[in-house]
């Protein structure tokens, strides 16, 4: 609920239109929703894993129709998932108070207000998977069998981050 409220000024501000990359991702999502293609990477690139964001947008297009507003709002649940993993990670290492503070700061961060709704092919995917990876690392205190399994999942997460937006690996590496 607070997430939606913090985004209202952008949504209602009159400048809620997609940039060029978002238009391309919107077309990719439209084609996915129509069953015409399965876009793994951003059009014309061998990086920028776009399947997750295009998938969220395609699902939203099928439910609510194709529009720039639907495209942008389809990214919020995905970003919110990354926010949840970030809060859970902070809670694991820093406690309840630290998690509350970090969660509120991230919600109200002006840069993330806009970027949490940017369908640009890989950025939000990298954000979500990076925080999933950090949360998994925070939970790897278990016995060796579980640690090995979770370590494999962490490795898969690192691969997804590398394909989505490799810059996000810099933030994950200290936790390894």
Image (cartoon, rainbow, N blue to C red):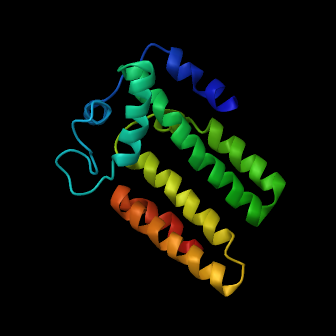
Q: Please give left or right for residue 92 compared with residue 5 in the image.
A: right
Q: Please give left or right for residue 142 compared with residue 117 in the image.
A: right
Q: Residue at x 20, y 44 (%)?
A: 43
The image quadrant of residue 56 is top left
Residue at far bottom of view: 144
Q: Residue at x 45, y 69 (%)?
A: 156
- Give x and y (percent) for residue 53: 40, 42
Task: Inspect this view and state whether residue 176 appears.
Answer: no
The image quadrant of residue 47 is bottom left
Asked whether 110 or 168 is in front, the reply is 168
Task: Inspect this view and state whether residue 138 appears.
Answer: yes
The image quadrant of residue 57 is top left
Quarter of the image for the C terminus: give it: bottom right
Residue at far front of view: 35
Asked whether 94 or 144 is in front, the reply is 144
Look at the picture and state if 61 lies above or below 134.
above
- Give x and y (percent) for residue 148: 58, 82
- Give x and y (percent) for residue 153: 52, 70
Asked whether 59 or 11 is in front, the reply is 59
Q: Residue at x 56, y 73 (%)?
A: 174
- Give x and y (percent) for residue 95: 81, 60
Look at the picture and state if 82 lies above or below 114.
below
Q: How many marks?
A: 0
Q: Residue at x 61, y 47 (%)?
A: 83
């Amino acid at each position: 609920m607070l997430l939606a409220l913090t985004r209202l000024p952008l949504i209602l501000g009159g400048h809620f239109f997609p940039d060029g990359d978002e238009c391309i991702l919107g077309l990719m999502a439209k084609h996915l929703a129509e069953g015409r293609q399965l876009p793994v990477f951003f059009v014309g690139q061998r990086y920028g894993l776009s399947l997750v964001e295009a998938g969220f947008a395609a699902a939203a297009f099928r439910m609510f129709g194709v529009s720039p507003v639907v495209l942008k709002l389809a990214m919020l649940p995905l970003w919110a998932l990354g926010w949840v993993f970030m809060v859970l990670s902070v809670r694991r290492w820093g406690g309840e108070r630290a998690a509350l503070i970090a969660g509120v700061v991230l919600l109200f961060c002006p840069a993330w207000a806009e970027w949490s709704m940017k369908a640009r092919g890989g950025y939000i995917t990298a954000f979500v998977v990076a925080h999933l990876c950090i949360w998994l690392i925070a939970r790897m205190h278990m016995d060796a069998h579980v640690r090995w399994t979770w370590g494999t999942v962490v490795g898969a997460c690192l691969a997804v981050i590398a394909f989505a937006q490799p810059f996000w690996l810099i933030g994950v590496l200290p936790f390894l």
